[in-house]
Image (spheres, rainbow, N blue to C red):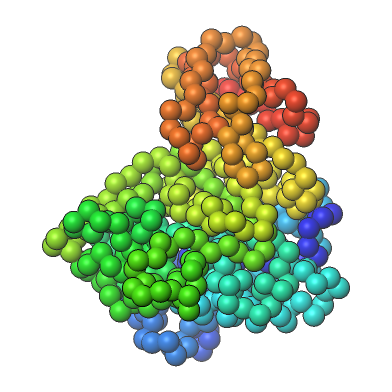
Amino acid sequence: MAAVGEAVVLIPGFMGSRLIRPDPLQTIWLDPEWNLLHIQEAVDLLRLQGPDDQRLAADAVLESVPLGAFSPQIYTPLLNFLRDPSQAGYPAENIHTFAFDWRRSIADGAYELDSKLGRWANRYQTDHPFVLLAHSYGGLVAAHALFTGNHAPARTALLITFGTPYAGLVKTLKSLQDMDEISDLPIAPVHLQQLLGDWPSTYDLMPFRDRLLMVKDAAGRPVSTADARIKLTGFRQDLVNASKNRLRLHQVPLPDQLPAPPDAVPLTPRPLPVPVRTIVGAGIDTPVRLRAKASGGVTVESDTEGDGTVPVVSALDVASAASLGRRVYPVPYGHHVSLVKDPVALAYLRTELRYGAAERYIVQLALRSPRLPIGGANEVILEVRDGEGGGLLDHVTASVEFSPKLRFTEESSAVPSEAAGRHYLRFNMPKQPTRLRVTIPGLPTNAQPAPLLIVPSA
């Protein structure tokens, strides 16, 4: 039985809610077969004609991509986890899903979320019945509701986010420039480029806090996306300006406290009014920095401090604020789309929901490559952090045991800040299955990492 909150609300990410045309009834996002046969009609319907465009409505959370027998699951594993008595253990009637029109701004989504929380709260006994579980863009919607709403801050016990780009992400801008990189969707890249440029949500996902150095202008000065003078195909300066004004509510000082000129004030994250848990993926090549060219184009730099979509520095942005109770959970090699079903992330979630985050330590093992041939170079990443994300490996000594015995070398991470607290155990794949057990002296049994079985591929 869950120990935190009477109910849980799942808030999906960008493109994570199904959109339907009510009359005649047809799923527009996402019905791959219909989309392919009616591509121009689908593109027309998905394009927002203005703030009052009501041709499509959000219908349900996209639990899986409907591709017949091979339909990949998205939110189904998380919903099953929430229902499972041995995991989170919420009654089915206390699990809410918030489907919303992800094309629209975070302000639109936040208003709708706040209204629904107010209606749902009437059935519960406690003052703070809700745990908000938000993935990616859904975390921005949740944060905006907590900053601007009436019911969200008053009724929320805890916010848990999976790969939320609190300070924005570079990949959205990269997609506008390199649409050919988008695959596995039933809409051609040229059409997606047109749509991305017309959706307010696209711009709410772009970096806006210049202090994080995610975006620089042609002169090399750190700026927000709105001030970088970008001139990509489909990029709309009016929409990015509107987004910058919305996102001012996510930073301090607050807008009515800004002295003149506003640009002289450092843009720092505003503390959220509820306890926050941040699940962060890292170790995957991610677009992390962007520089605008004099021509209006952009150049993009990548590194592995991210989940493939969201840079670690952006996902941790809200955690750097002095919020009420904050905790960071790292998921080594956690991929953005899969964070909501990653076993490591779900283990963190189980501890939070069942035990109220009583556990101080976060310890995890992960193989860089799950299957390699005999003799192949591999490594295990070992994360040991406290509940606020601080690295503990400078203060504890891990006991490492391979069974059968295996030679390995240990190297501390040379990267400071977020990567601190990370060790690598490097080895060559053995000839036979080998079990790896790591023990951290002084940690309780349920905080120790589970053993890893290392099996060479054929």
Q: Which of 327 and 50 is in front in this view?
A: 327
Instruction: Identify the residue at image location x=56%, y=59%.
Output: 135
Q: Is residue 36 visible?
A: no
- Whether residue 68 sits left or right of residue 227 in the image: it is right
- Whether residue 32 sits left or right of residue 97 in the image: it is left
Instruction: Identify the residue at image location x=44%, y=90%.
Output: 52
Up the image or down, 440 lies above or below 346; here it is above
Residue 391 position by quadrant: top right
- Whether residue 328 sits left or right of residue 81 in the image: it is left
Q: Which of 387 and 342 is in front in this view?
A: 387
The location of residue 114, given as percent across then percent down, is 63, 78
Up the image or down, 123 lies above or below 342; here it is below
Q: Which of 350 and 211 is in front in this view?
A: 211
Q: Quadrant location of the N terminus?
A: bottom right
Up the image or down, 243 lies above or below 10; here it is below
The location of residue 165, given as percent across then percent down, is 47, 58
The location of residue 411, given as percent across then percent down, is 48, 20
- Whether residue 356 sits left or right of residue 249 in the image: it is right
Instruction: Identify the residue at image location x=65%, y=15%.
Output: 401
